[in-house]
Image (cartoon, helix red, strand yellow):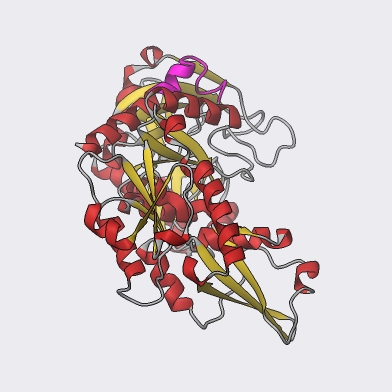
Amino acid sequence: MYKTLVVVDDPRSVPEMNNLTLISFERYLADYPQRNEAKTLVINLCDTEHYLSRGYYCSLLAEARQHKVLPSVRTINDLRSLEGQLTTILGAPLTPGLKAQIEASTPLVIEVFLGWAEAGPWQKLAKQIFEQYPAPIVQLQLTQHEGEIGLAVKRLAFAELQPQQQALFLQRLQQFADRNWRSPNARQKFRWDMAILVNPDEPTPPSNPEAIKRFIKAAAKVGIHAETITIHQAGQIGHFDALFIRETTAIDHPTYRLARKAEQEGLVVIDDPTSILRCCNKVFLHDAFSYNNVPALKTQVVMSAAAEDLDGLEAAFTYPMVIKMPESSFSKGVFKVSNRTELQSKIEQLLSSTAIVLVQEYLYTEFDWRIGVLNGRAIYACRYHMARNHWQIYNHDAKRFNSGGFATLPTFEVPKRVLDAAIKACKIIGQGLYGVDIKQHGQQSYVIEVNDNPSLEHKVEDLYLGNELYMQIMAEFARRLERRGR
């Protein structure tokens, strides 16, 4: 349950609003934090122009008091550093129609209120700016010189607005509060807020839309209000208590940066940045498996396609061999070579974009095991069969049948050697949610990799447990949130 405080330079200048408490900075300084107070959200409308001003201290103290605040001190400093400077247009270029509205002689001025612009055509740009610089009020100045568009971003205090603009802003503030914070009556059954990161444009996301709906329903049953966000809303992550990443992760990628930011702000995060860092790089996994005696296929690190290196590989492996990029997912960046010419060509091709590639022995099996592990415990198991006429479970070149069939089993039907190998591999990574890929050959099990962002799709991985799979994951979030609060 949230309480929203709106801190203004002069509370008498602002009418009362539903579910919002209007106070001065002096009152916020003297009366807060309060004993046994509800989780508090602060919307700081004070003037933040000067360093160590009241507005600056309002956001600084809000962060120290563990209140969620808009704008944050970081945003205040970022906007101050932009004063008088041009920055670039975020996202896609402006359309010809929007460009035509910008005169060369006079800047086009647009006020952005909580990510909203009164002029509809500029709404997309206003939203982009708010996601980059989440502040209640900013002013944009767009200029055009020789066909190039310049954008200046300036912070504004509520007191600097004209009366008509103030009334419009307060209307947007009420709508923003109703939508984002929601009224206490609507939220009284929830103790925490969770952001589920998704990418609507991702062709092969780790969870399909129906699975996301079931995660949200399961979260509600354990006291968590969950809602989806995209990476463009990363600036608002501080308004949540937990982050669940359901977009494919990578190290040099916004998902990793958001995970780090969320962890630094005290959120419970799955996938946590350490797990992303370790799982997304197969070089780390190879070394970690070797040093910790995790059963794995023979693998070598290669940094050259010179003749002596190829000779060494041919002495250590038989054809075919498997060549892997250090970072890849969904069977992408993984190749099979059948002779020396293909071996040299593929290594040279990959080394043009990475300093290291991996060469691994080839072992064909009719299926790969995928064991889902959460906090050191196996929670689901699948057998993913190879794609038709292909050696991997995904065939990205096929127009039809680009993936094989699957079978979802209870974990007690999985061979003990497979489960033991999966849990041992995950202990190296952390205590998050992982999908461990394992090949089974006779009585031997070989860990191929550990995925920090495993597929969890409705009617696939949940086929045996059903809604219980979603409940187990959300219950783990609730357990960690409860522990965090002690």
Residue at (57% x, 48% y) in the render: 339
Q: Is residue 106 above or below residue 462?
A: below
Quadrant into which the N terminus falls:
top left
Q: Measuring from the top left, give residue 141's x and y in whole percent.
A: 62, 76
Q: What is the magenta segment's predominant secondary structure?
A: loop
Q: Measuring from the top left, give residue 426's x and y in whole percent.
A: 31, 35
Q: Nearer the viewer, residue 47 or 483?
A: 47
Q: Measuring from the top left, give residue 49's x and y in whole percent.
A: 41, 75
28 sits left or right of 336 in the view = left
The image quadrant of residue 483 is: top left
Q: Is residue 18 above or below residue 24?
A: above
Q: Nearer the viewer, residue 395 or 390?
A: 395
Indicate whether residue 373 is drawn in magenta: no
Q: Measuring from the top left, give residue 263's x and y in whole percent.
A: 33, 49
Quadrant into which the C terminus falls:
top left
Residue 344 makes an appearance in the image: no
Q: Which residues are magenta?
A: 458-471
328 sits left or right of 61 in the view = right
Residue 191 makes an appearance in the image: yes
Residue at (67% x, 63% y) in the render: 92
Residue at (53% x, 36% y) in the render: 206
